[in-house]
Image (spheres, helix red, strand yellow):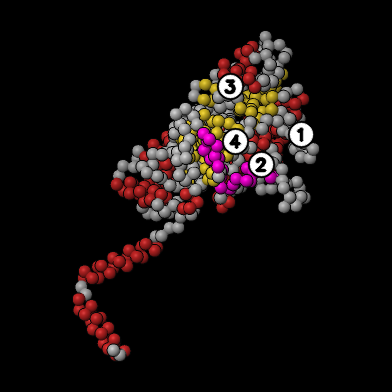
Amino acid sequence: MGAGDYLTKLDESLSALGSQWNGYSTGIATAFVVMLTYSVMSRVEPEIHPMLLARQAQGSAVRQEGQSPIYRANSAPHGYPLNSGLNVKTPGASKWAAGRDGDLRDIWRNAISGDAGAILTVLGREKVLDHKLSEITRQINLVGQHIASQGGKKVAIYLPNSVELLAALFACSFHGLTAVLIPFNVSDAELVSMLRRSEADAVVTATGSFPFDSVVKSYPGLRQLIWVVDEGSKHMDWNEVPQGTGSRVNVSTWQDILNDNPVAAGLELPAAEGQSPAKEVIMFTKKGGDLEEMVSFTQGNLVSAVSAQLTAVPSKYKLSQADLFLPASSLVSPFTLVMTLAALHANASVALNSVAGATPDLELATAGVAPTVIVTEPEAILKSHEQVNGKLTSYIAKASHYVQTRSLVQNGAMPAASFLASYNDSIRPVFGTTPGKLRLLYVADTVGTQSSRLSEAALSNLRVFTGSRVIHALAAPQVAGAVAQTQFHDYRVQGDGSGTHYGAPLSSVEVYLKDSGSHKITDTDYTGEVVVRGPAVSGGEASIGIIGNIRQDNTLGRV
C-alpha cells in the first residue's frame, strides 16, 4: 500500500469522524480538556518529601532485653554526639575551629550584638513599652552586683513574665549566683516550701504578691528581698522592714538599686575571658495539685536545648530579627524559657506580658502587638479552636474548611489564598494587631500537668484557622526544652484524626522505652515507659513517668 492510499484512508476517517460529531462530542472533549488543564494548573508540590516523614527518627541497630531501640533525631545519628551547645567561637578563631558550648551569658551577649531585636512590655491594647537592651544590661550588672555584695548565693525569682524576670535570670548567670525560678501566684505554704527546699537566701519579687511577714516567720534563711515596684506604688517606702523581723533581712527595691548608681555604671558586661562557670538554674513545675520535685538544670542543659530548638526549624523559616516572639505561657516552664532564650539568641524581638499560672486568653494576650511566633499551652489554644470550630455551620464554611484541610493533608502544603478559602476569614481567631502575620505556633504538652491533648485533627484545624504552622511538643520537668516535637512540615492526619503524636526526639536528647507493668516490649510492639537521656536532661538521664509508644514512622506517641 502506497503513501497515497494511507492519505486516502486518513481522509476518509476524518470525514467519518466529522460527520458523526455533535453537541455531546463537543461537551465530552471540552470536559476532558478542562479536567486536564485543572489537574496541571492546580498541582501542588508537597513542602517536604513524603519519605522524610515516613521515618522521622533513627533507631539503634540493637536493643537491650526489655527495652526498645534507642531513637535519635535524623540530624543527630548514632555514632555522633548529641547537640550539646551553641558552638560559641572565640573572636578571631578560624571558622573551622570547634567552638565551646557556651552558657546563658553567651545568649545575652549575642542578643545585644549586631542587629539586635527589641524587648517589649505589653500593658493592654494601648500601651507597649520598648526597653533599650543597654538599659537591661545595666540592670543585669547592677542587680547582680548588689545581690553578690550582700552575700547572696541562691536567688529566688518570684515574678510574672517581665523584663525584670529575664534580667534577674541573666544577672545570676553573670555574677556567680544560682537562680531559683518559682511559679507565680502559688499559695503561701507552697512558696515557703519551695524557698526552704531550694535554700534560697535572696528573693526578687513584685510588690503586693509576696507575703513578707509569713515568709520571714516560717523561713529564717531569707537574707535579702528586692521589690520590683510598679508605677502606681513608687511613692511608697518599700525599704522599711516590718517590726518583729529584726535586721536579718536586707530590703531594697529594684528601682533604688538602679537609681543609686551613676547613669554610666553597669553598661559594659564582664569580659568573657577567664570567666568562672555559671551556676545552675533551679526550677519547680506544678503537677496537678502537687508540686513536682525540684529540678536543677545546669547551664549546659539549657544551652543544649536552646541549640536544638534553633536547628529544629528549617533554615528558611528559622527565628530571626524579623520575628516578634510572644511567650503566652509562664517563663517558669522549661519549654517556654528555652524557646524565649532561643528567640533572644536569634536576635528576634520579644514581647512580654504578665502571664502567670492561669490559662491565658490568646486574643487578649496578643493585644497591642503583632507576634509572628507564639508559645502557648494546650488549654489556651484549644479554647480558640472550639470557638472557631463551633462557627463552621454553613455548607459554604464547611466547604471552605474542607478545601484547606485537603491541601494540608493530601497535598502536604499550607493552603494557598483563594476566594473560597477567604470565606472563613471573619470567624478566624485574631492573634495580634495584624491578622495573618502569625507564622509559627508552639504548643507544649507538659508531663505531670492536667493539660488536654491535642489530636492530629485539632492540629490540622488550627493550621487552617490561624494560617500558621503548628509545632506540637512533649515537655517534661526533667528535660530542658522538649523531649520530642513534630516536624515543621508534618501536616498528616492518620485515620479519623483522634490520635496524638509528638514527632521525633530533638537533637539534644535520645529516647527509648522500657518495660513497665503490663506493658512489655516485644519485637513488634514498642510500648513502655519513656526514658530520656542526653545533654539537655537534668542528671543526664530521666524516666519522665508516662507510657509511650513508637509509631511506624518512628515518632513518639503517648498511651
**Where residue 267 sits: x, y (%)?**
74, 37
User: Could you say which disc has been placed on residue 85 in the image?
Assistant: 2
Read off the magenta span.
62-88
Q: Say which of marks 1 and 4 sits in front.
A: 4
Which residue position is annotated with label 3? 209
Q: Which residue type carries mark 1?
A: Ser
**Outermost residue toward the top in this view:** 244
Give the camera-side residue of 26 and 302: 302
Q: Is residue 515 magenta?
A: no
Q: Secondary structure at mark 2?
A: loop
Q: CA distance from mark 3 to mark 2?
A: 36 Å
Q: Which residue type carries mark 4?
A: Arg
Q: Say which of marks 3 and 1 sits in front.
A: 1
Q: Say which of marks 3 and 4 sits in front.
A: 4
Which residue position is annotated with label 4? 533
Give the camera-side residue of 428 and 273: 273
* Residue at x 71%, y 11% (from the top left corner): 246
* Residue at x 62%, y 31% (from the top left corner): 538
**Where residue 132 sits: x, y (%)?**
66, 39
* Residue at x 49%, y 48% (from the top left corner): 55
Q: CA distance from mark 1 to mark 4?
A: 27 Å
